[in-house]
Image (cartoon, helix red, strand yellow):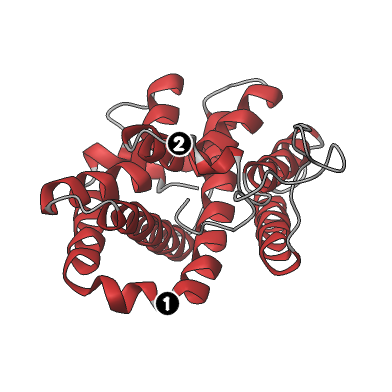
C-alpha cells in the first residue's frame, strides 16, 4: 500500500489521506528495521562505513526496487522518494556508531522485522494487482518485496541467503500476499484483506521465532531423518 501519488492511481486505491500517511509511516519504519539488519550484517563482517551504508540500503530497498522495475512503476519509490534513502542511511549510521546497543535489541528488532515483512508483502501484492498482474504473479511479487533485500544483502556478503536457511520467513510473506490476492479475486474490500494478510504473515513469522518452526531440509549422512537440521545451522539469524 504505497502512497497513491507514487503511481497516479488515487481513485483506484481509494485511500484517505490519513490512511496513506499511516501506511507510509509504517513502510518507512519497516525500511528502517530492514536497514538495521543489513547494516548489522555488514558490521559483523567488519566492513567500513561505506560498506555498512550500502548494505543498509540494499537490505531495506532491493525487494521494492526489483518489484517496481518488474511492474513498470518507475522510478521506484526507493529512488524517487528521498525519505527511503534517508531512513536507510540513518539506520546504517546508527549501527556503525552504536552497534553494541543495536545488538542488545535483538528481540524488539525481530518483532519489528516481522511487522515490516508483513507490511511489505501486503503492499507488494496490492501494488502488483493495481498494475494488472495475474494473481499468482502478484502473490510472488508480494513475497519478493519482503525477502528481496535480504537475498541481495547475503549475495553481496557471499553467503547463502538466510531466507533459504532460517525459520519460516519467505513462506510467511507468501501466505500474507496470497490472502491479499485471494481477497481481490473474491471482490472483497482491500483494507480488511490487507489487514488479514498482514496479520497472518506477522503471526506465522512470530510463531516461527518463538516455537522454532522451520521447513524440512534435505537429509545428509549422519542425520536421523529428512526433517533434521544440518549440524551447526540450527541457530536463528535475525538479520534477514
Q: Earlier in the sequence, mark 2 or mark 1?
A: 1
231 sits to left or right of 40: right
Residue found at x 55% / y 62%:
115
Please count the marks in the image. Answer: 2
Q: Residues within 10 Å of mark 1 (few under 14, many from 20)?
A: few
**Mark 2 residue element:** helix
Q: Who's the residue at 26% across and 62% down the image?
A: 91
139 or 23, which is in the foreground? Answer: 139
Percent coordinates x, y for residue 56 in the rendering: 28, 51
- Answer whether residue 54 is visible to the viewer in this image: yes
Task: Give the residue pinned by disc 2.
Answer: 151
User: Pointer 2: residues within 10 angstroms few (<14), some, or many (20+)?
Assistant: many
Q: Is 10 placed above or below 213 here?
A: above
Q: Secondary structure at mark 1?
A: loop
Q: Residue furthest right?
A: 225
Q: Which mark is residue 132?
A: none
Residue where numbered disc 1 is placed: 105
Q: Measured along the vertical axis of the image, is residue 131 above or below residue 197?
A: above
Give 172 or 46, whichever is nearer the viewer: 46
As drawn, the residue found furthest toward the front would be 222
Mark 2–mark 1 Cα distance, whole angstroms, equals 23 Å
Answer whether labels 2 and 1 touch (C-beta < 8 Å): no
Q: Going by the image, does 217 lie left or right of 102?
A: right
Displayed quadrant of residue 126: top right
Q: Position of residue 61 (x, y in %)?
A: 35, 42
Residue 82 appears in view = no
Instruction: Give the left or right position of residue 184, taking residue 94 as reference.
Output: right
Q: Position of residue 171 (x, y in %)?
A: 69, 42
* On screen, residue 168 above or below 156: below
Question: Is 238 displayed left or right of 211 in the figure?
Answer: left
Identify the residue at horizontal 85%, vertical 36% (top origin): 226
**Residue 175, horizontal then vertical, whole percent:** 73, 44
Amino acid at each position: 500500500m504505497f502512497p497513491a501519488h507514487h503511481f497516479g492511481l488515487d481513485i483506484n486505491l481509494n485511500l484517505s489521506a490519513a490512511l496513506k500517511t499511516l501506511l507510509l509511516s509504517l513502510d518507512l519504519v519497516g525500511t528502517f528495521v530492514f536497514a538495521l539488519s543489513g547494516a548489522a550484517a555488514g558490521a559483523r563482517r567488519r566492513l567500513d562505513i561505506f560498506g555498512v551504508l550500502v548494505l543498509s540500503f540494499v537490505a531495506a530497498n532491493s525487494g521494492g526496487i526489483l518489484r517496481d522495475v518488474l511492474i513498470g512503476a518507475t522510478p521506484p519509490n526507493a529512488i524517487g522518494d528521498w525519505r527511503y534513502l534517508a531512513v536507510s542511511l540513518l539506520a546504517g549510521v546508527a549501527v556503525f556508531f552504536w552497534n553494541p546497543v543495536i545488538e542488545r535489541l535483538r528481540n524488539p528488532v525481530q518483532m519489528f522485522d516481522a511487522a515490516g515483512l508483513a507490511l511489505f508483502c501486503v503492499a507488494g501484492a496490492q501494488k502488483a494487482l493495481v498494475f494488472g498482474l495475474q494473481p499468482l504473479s502478484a502473490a510472488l511479487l508480494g513475497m519478493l518485496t519482503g525477502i528481496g533485500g535480504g537475498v541481495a544483502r547475503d549475495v553481496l556478503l557471499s553467503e547463502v541467503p538466510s531466507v533459504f536457511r532460517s525459520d519460516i520467513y519467505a513462506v510467511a510473506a507468501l501466505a500474507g500476499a496470497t490472502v491479499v490476492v485471494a481477497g481481490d479475486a473474491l471482490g472483497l474490500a482491500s483494507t480488511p484483506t490487507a489487514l488479514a494478510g498482514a496479520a497472518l504473515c506477522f503471526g506465522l513469522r512470530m510463531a516461527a521465532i518463538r516455537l522454532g518452526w522451520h521447513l524440512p531440509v534435505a537429509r545428509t549422512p549422519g542425520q536421523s531423518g529428512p526433517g533434521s537440521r544440518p549440524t551447526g545451522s540450527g541457530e536463528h539469524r535475525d538479520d534477514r
